Protein backbone atom coordinates (compact mmCIF):
# COMPACT_ATOMS: atom_id res chain seq x y z
CA UNK A 1 0.00 0.00 0.00
CA UNK A 2 1.36 3.42 -0.95
CA UNK A 3 1.59 6.17 1.66
CA UNK A 4 -0.32 9.21 0.46
CA UNK A 5 0.32 12.78 1.42
CA UNK A 6 -3.18 13.04 2.90
CA UNK A 7 -2.66 9.91 5.00
CA UNK A 8 0.64 11.17 6.35
CA UNK A 9 -0.81 14.57 7.26
CA UNK A 10 -3.82 12.98 9.00
CA UNK A 11 -1.62 10.61 11.01
CA UNK A 12 0.73 13.44 11.96
CA UNK A 13 -2.20 15.56 13.09
CA UNK A 14 -3.57 12.64 15.11
CA UNK A 15 -0.25 12.14 16.78
CA UNK A 16 0.09 15.84 17.64
CA UNK A 17 -3.47 16.13 18.96
CA UNK A 18 -3.10 12.98 21.04
CA UNK A 19 0.18 14.12 22.56
CA UNK A 20 -1.34 17.47 23.56
CA UNK A 21 -4.48 16.01 25.07
CA UNK A 22 -3.20 12.79 26.64
CA UNK A 23 -0.76 13.25 29.48
CA UNK A 24 1.35 16.35 29.02
CA UNK A 25 3.93 15.27 31.55
CA UNK A 26 4.51 11.96 29.77
CA UNK A 27 4.58 13.51 26.30
CA UNK A 28 8.20 14.57 26.70
CA UNK A 29 9.33 10.95 26.75
CA UNK A 30 9.17 8.80 23.63
CA UNK A 31 6.86 5.80 23.90
CA UNK A 32 8.32 2.45 24.89
CA UNK A 33 6.23 0.77 22.18
CA UNK A 34 3.95 1.74 19.30
CA UNK A 35 1.13 -0.57 18.21
CA UNK A 36 -0.07 -0.07 14.64
CA UNK A 37 -1.83 -1.79 11.77
CA UNK A 38 0.23 -1.95 8.57
CA UNK A 39 -2.96 -2.43 6.53
CA UNK A 40 -4.07 1.12 7.41
CA UNK A 41 -2.08 4.04 5.97
CA UNK A 42 -2.83 6.44 8.85
CA UNK A 43 -1.79 3.86 11.41
CA UNK A 44 1.49 3.18 9.59
CA UNK A 45 2.27 6.89 9.38
CA UNK A 46 1.48 7.31 13.07
CA UNK A 47 3.91 4.54 14.01
CA UNK A 48 6.71 5.85 11.80
CA UNK A 49 6.41 9.34 13.28
CA UNK A 50 7.34 8.11 16.77
CA UNK A 51 10.67 6.42 16.08
CA UNK A 52 10.05 3.81 18.79
CA UNK A 53 9.89 0.00 18.74
CA UNK A 54 6.76 -1.13 16.92
CA UNK A 55 4.44 -4.12 16.80
CA UNK A 56 2.23 -4.62 13.77
CA UNK A 57 -1.28 -5.77 14.74
CA UNK A 58 -1.80 -7.22 11.25
CA UNK A 59 0.83 -9.87 12.02
CA UNK A 60 -0.50 -10.59 15.51
CA UNK A 61 -3.81 -11.98 14.31
CA UNK A 62 -2.05 -14.99 12.76
CA UNK A 63 -0.01 -15.73 15.91
CA UNK A 64 -2.91 -15.15 18.31
CA UNK A 65 -1.18 -12.09 19.78
CA UNK A 66 1.84 -14.14 20.91
CA UNK A 67 4.35 -11.23 20.81
CA UNK A 68 2.05 -9.02 22.85
CA UNK A 69 1.02 -11.70 25.34
CA UNK A 70 4.70 -12.54 25.88
CA UNK A 71 5.11 -9.28 27.77
CA UNK A 72 4.67 -5.59 27.17
CA UNK A 73 7.41 -3.13 28.17
CA UNK A 74 6.97 -0.75 31.07
CA UNK A 75 6.34 2.84 30.09
CA UNK A 76 4.07 4.46 27.53
CA UNK A 77 2.51 2.28 24.87
CA UNK A 78 0.64 4.18 22.18
CA UNK A 79 -1.45 3.00 19.28
CA UNK A 80 -3.68 4.02 16.41
CA UNK A 81 -5.79 0.98 15.56
CA UNK A 82 -9.32 -0.19 14.97
CA UNK A 83 -11.60 -0.28 18.01
CA UNK A 84 -11.59 -4.09 18.15
CA UNK A 85 -7.78 -4.20 18.25
CA UNK A 86 -7.76 -1.58 21.02
CA UNK A 87 -10.17 -3.69 23.07
CA UNK A 88 -7.93 -6.74 22.64
CA UNK A 89 -4.82 -4.73 23.56
CA UNK A 90 -6.55 -3.25 26.59
CA UNK A 91 -7.44 -6.70 27.89
CA UNK A 92 -3.89 -7.98 27.50
CA UNK A 93 -2.42 -4.83 29.03
CA UNK A 94 -4.70 -4.95 32.09
CA UNK A 95 -3.74 -8.59 32.64
CA UNK A 96 -0.09 -7.45 32.63
CA UNK A 97 -0.66 -4.67 35.16
CA UNK A 98 -0.96 -1.72 32.76
CA UNK A 99 -3.95 0.58 32.45
CA UNK A 100 -5.51 2.90 29.91
CA UNK A 101 -4.04 6.40 30.29
CA UNK A 102 -5.98 7.97 27.41
CA UNK A 103 -8.16 6.93 24.49
CA UNK A 104 -10.41 8.57 21.95
CA UNK A 105 -11.88 7.94 18.52
CA UNK A 106 -10.04 9.33 15.53
CA UNK A 107 -12.25 8.93 12.50
CA UNK A 108 -12.67 5.22 11.82
CA UNK A 109 -9.68 4.44 14.06
CA UNK A 110 -9.03 4.68 17.76
CA UNK A 111 -6.10 6.59 19.29
CA UNK A 112 -4.97 5.31 22.68
CA UNK A 113 -2.22 5.24 25.30
CA UNK A 114 -1.47 2.60 27.92
CA UNK A 115 0.84 3.08 30.85
Image (cartoon, helix red, strand yellow):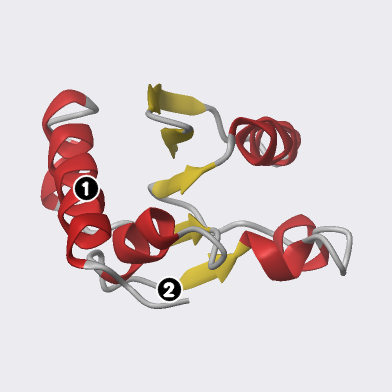
Rendering coords of residue 52 (x, y %): 33, 71
How far apart are labels 1 and 2 at the CA level?
Answer: 21 Å
Secondary structure beneath disc 1? helix
Q: Position of residue 3 (x, y in %)?
A: 32, 73
**Quarter residue 2 falls in:** bottom left
Q: Residue at x 25, y 51 (%)?
A: 11
Say which of 100 and 4 sits in front.
4
Viewer-closest of 81 and 91: 81
For disc 2, the marked residue is 53
Instruction: Give the residue drawn at x 74%, y 40%.
Output: 92
Q: Residue at x 41, y 62 (%)?
A: 41
Q: Identify the residue under disc 1.
A: 10
Q: Between residues 84 and 70, which one lies in front from this camera angle?
A: 84
**Residue located at (36% from left, 63% from top):** 47
Indicate the quadrant where residue 48 lies.
bottom left
Could you say where residue 31 lies in the image, as x and y percent from the top left?
32, 56
Q: Earlier in the sequence, mark 1 or mark 2?
A: 1
Amino acid sequence: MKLSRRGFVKASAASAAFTRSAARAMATQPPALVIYDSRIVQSRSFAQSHGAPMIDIALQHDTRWRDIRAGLPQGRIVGLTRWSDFVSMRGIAVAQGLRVAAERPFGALHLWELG
